[in-house]
Image (spheres, rainbow, N blue to C red):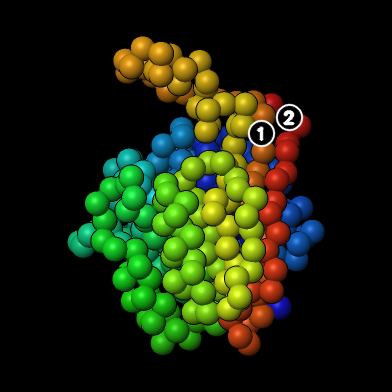
Amino acid sequence: MINILFIGDIFGRPGRLLVRELLPDLINRYQVDLVVANVENASGGVGLTIKAAEDLFRAGVNVMTSGNHIFKHKEIIEYLEENERLLRPVNYPEPAPGRGTALVETSGRIKVGIVNLLGRVFMAPVDCPFRAADREVTALKESGAQVILFDIHAEATSEKIALSRYLDGRIGALIGTHTHVQTADEAVLPNGLAYLTDAGMTGPHDSVIGMRQEAIIERFLTARPVRFQAAKKGLRLEGAVISFKPETGCAENITRIRESFPLER
């Protein structure tokens, strides 16, 4: 059995603080073999900088996934090319910098494939995530992957659910990201795929999906541009721990994680 911790969208400096403070205990408590985190919003709430990426790697994150904001900071483009454990959605139209899949080996010598997908409903006009999934599952299995986990960064619940049913029996887990609101529908599907519509957000929950609420409310009231700023209060790490049987590649269990942090910095 191996356990993978998936951390929901890390939001700004507060999210990175949560990972630094809480990750060691979570690894010990759940006997975690691999840590995967979505870092789509890890720098100021939008995108990722090199400094933030390296901070999270040092904190114990093994593989980072992302989404529609990954190219916000130009400096990250070269870093994507250099670092095989930082992923951008695999179905961005080619040519796109970086890669969308990673094949890593745990300390127990289990090969795990990680795939980052972007949905199309209410999102950017990317390539079909279903056909991209077919291609990547085949390639990872040919490369020896024993367990495969997908991050589907998407807006529509229907798209995420449809993809989970489409892939059930072929991969071990499909975890949704992007909405910053953790859902309570975790389940292991009939053919062994662990599913969660959205892993939630790791950051300030006294906010509007991470941003200070006053600015967001003003935007809704006036329909005029305002400056958004990351909030600081209500810190909580959200995600899930998935247990897999390497001999089958199927999930045995999925447990949602919600960990509050008492200090405000």
Dot placed on the residue nearer the N-terminal end, 1 or 2: 1
Residue 206 screen position, x and y as percent: 62, 26
**Which residue in the structure is indicated by mark 2?**
263
Residue 46 left/right relative to 107: left
Outermost residue on the left side: it is: 95
Residue 149 screen position, x and y as percent: 52, 68
Residue 18 left/right relative to 63: right
Q: Which of 22 and 238 is in front in this view?
A: 238
In the rendered structure, find residue 235 and report the number of the disc placed on it.
1
Residue 163 screen position, x and y as percent: 44, 65
User: In the rendered image, which quarter is residue 139 located in?
Assistant: bottom left
Q: Is residue 102 above or below residue 13?
A: below
Identify residue type, mark 2: Leu
Dot 1 crowding, Cα within 10 Å, few <14, some 14–19, many 20+: many
Identify residue type, mark 1: Leu
Q: Is residue 234 above or below residue 10?
A: above
The quarter of the image holding the N terminus is bottom right
User: In the rendered image, which quarter is residue 224 located in?
Assistant: top left
The quarter of the image holding the C terminus is top right
Q: Residue at x 47, y 17 (%)?
A: 217
Looking at the image, do the residues carrying marks 1 and 2 touch, with CB atoms under 8 Å apart? yes
